[in-house]
Image: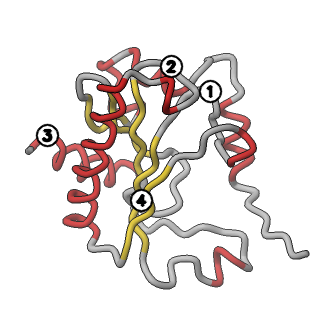
Amino acid sequence: MDYLWTPWRSTYMKAKQTSLGCIFCAAAADPADDERNLVVFRAARNFVILNRYPYTSGHLMIAPYEHVSRLNGADPETALEMISLARRAERYIEAIYLPDGLNLGMNLGEAAGAGIEQHIHMHVLPRWKGDANFMTTVGETRIVPESLDETYLKLREKFASA
């Protein structure tokens, strides 16, 4: 069996275990800190936030304000709005980044790969042919060609303009 190591995720996993509690609840709590927390858009029941440790430029997440660990535990209106925001994110990411495809998904529970299993969140991220290249698969290094600040400004502008 071959193993592919992703040592950069240890930073992410350690950060989620801090005494700050749930990172999604903390980010949702104070709209005045949206830029620092990378929250690009707030809807009635969910918010859109950049992944601080992205797989690609434009990697965002949609999380509900309610703290639930399973999609079926969310209010039905929250789930509907989450899908609506995912559709918007799909359009905006395609317009900004011109990807070859997109990944859209949720990992529910630690066994399913959830890095933060206590608060549901949906990932939306652009993908390009060959974006998992030598550096990622052999060099154990992810190359993201755009700063989070630049990604934040692009996506915040798109969400605000709709």
Mark 4 or 1, closer to the camera: 1
In the visual, does 41 lie left or right of 72?
A: left
Point out the tag, 2 or 4, that comes first from the N-terminus: 2
Where is residue 11 shown, x and y percent of the image?
Answer: 70, 44
For mark 2, what is the residue? 67
Residues tagged 4 and 1 counted as in contact (Cβ below 8 A): no
Q: Do the residues labelled 2 and 1 touch (CB within 8 Å)?
A: yes
> Given the image, on which type of amino acid does mark 3 rest?
Ala
Residue beneath disc 3: 160
Residue at the image point whose x is 17% and y is 46% from the top = 157
The residue labelled by disc 4 is 125
Amino acid carrying label 4: it is Leu
At x 48% / y 46%, what residue is drawn? 51
Answer above or below: position of 66 versus 116: above
Q: Which mark is residue 118?
A: 1
Which circle, 3 or 4, is nearer the viewer?
A: 4
Which residue is nearer to you in this view: 135 or 94? 94
Question: Helix, strand, or loop for circle 1?
Answer: loop
Of labels 3 and 1, earlier in sequence is 1
